[in-house]
Amino acid sequence: MKRIIVLVLLVGIAGLAGVVRSYTKSGHSLRSWPHSVKAQPSSGDVRDEIRKTVELSPGARVNVSGINGAVTIETSDTRTAEIYIERTAESQEALNRRKIVINHTADSLSIKGEKDGSFLGKIFGSNPREKVTLRLPKQIALNTSGVNGALKVGEIDGPVDVSGINGRVEVAEASGSANFSGINGQVSFALRGLSKAIDISGINGNIEMRLSENVNADLEASGMNGAVTSELPNVVVDKTSRGNYSARIGNGGTQISASGINGNIRLKGLGNLKAA
């Protein structure tokens, strides 16, 4: 019995010695051992914020691009642009791999996400996540592209150009013109008036267009995996061939082109804000 107890003790001591030997070979000192094997905090808790306020002239061009997360744009009758961006990542090193660059003049504002261009960054990089909230003047020309998240925009007294969005797109109202392309999600927007042709292409989701009573336009839709329907009394919709539709809105006029739509197009009144 004593021999068995001694044998068990010797095996235990040998195992402990092996662990210590392996640990010291790795470059750690024994003094740091208790701290090194301690459980690490959970990931995703590294965070920083960007806050900035700038003045913009009426009609200023605003560009938002390369954002890895949702973008919300609120508007009001002001000349002040308020910028708030929250960034999160699994580590400080990951957070440092990517920057948000903000440039502005009286006539323009650019908010752009830039990745780490290094070789190791491209292979092992982990992108931070961003949540962008902007409070902008209504009188702007808005361009958004390369957003990996939902995009929600308030009333814009000017043109809107949206492309490369991986998420739902909502534009409360635009005037003059609006273009949408390369969107993986539903699209909902309102137009109070048209002064230029509108192009809608490469949409993977339903589209809702809300139009004011004074809009006169001709809609041509091609390559659709869906249908064009209207709730407006002054619209006539025709199915010209498989996947192709045409519609005269009011007296006709400004061209609205839609192509490569994997979903339905619904035309509604401006006062009906129900989402698609």
Image (cartoon, rainbow, N blue to C red):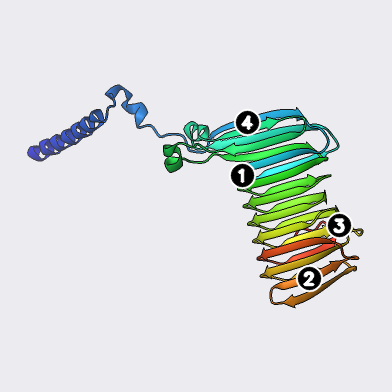
Q: CA distance from mark 2 to mark 1?
A: 36 Å
Between 87 and 115, the one nearer to me in the picture: 115
> Which marked residue is nearer to the observer: mark 2 or mark 4?
2
Q: Quadrant of residue 200?
A: bottom right
At horizontal 50% and vertical 31% (from top left) the residue drawn is 92
Left or right: where 261 falls relative to 235:
left
Query: Residue 242 location, x and y as percent?
Result: 69, 77
Say whether marks 2 and 4 touch (CB < 8 Å).
Answer: no
Q: Look at the numbered discs 4 and 3 and tell me whether their residues touch, using CB distance below 8 Å.
A: no
Callout 3, which amino acid? Leu
- The answer to whether the residues at label 3 and label 1 have Cβ atoms under 8 Å apart is no
State the residue at coordinates (50%, 36%): 116
Instruction: Please give the residue where the numbered disc 4 appears in the rendered image.
Output: 49
Amino acid on which disc 2 is placed = Ser
Q: Extreme bottom residue here?
A: 241
Q: Earlier in the sequence, mark 2 or mark 1?
A: 1
Quadrant of res 67? top right
Q: In the figure, is residue 70 to the left or right of 16?
A: right
What residue sits right under mark 2 in the picture? 246
Instruction: Say which residue appears at 67% left-offset and 55% top-offset.
Output: 181
Q: Residues within 10 Å of mark 1 (few under 14, many from 20)?
A: some
Q: In the rendered structure, which disc, 3 or 1, sits on the residue that comes first in sequence?
A: 1
Q: Earlier in the sequence, mark 2 or mark 3?
A: 2
- The residue lying toward the viewer, choosing from 49 and 162, is 162
Q: Residue at x 65, y 45 (%)?
A: 70
The disc at residue 69 is 1
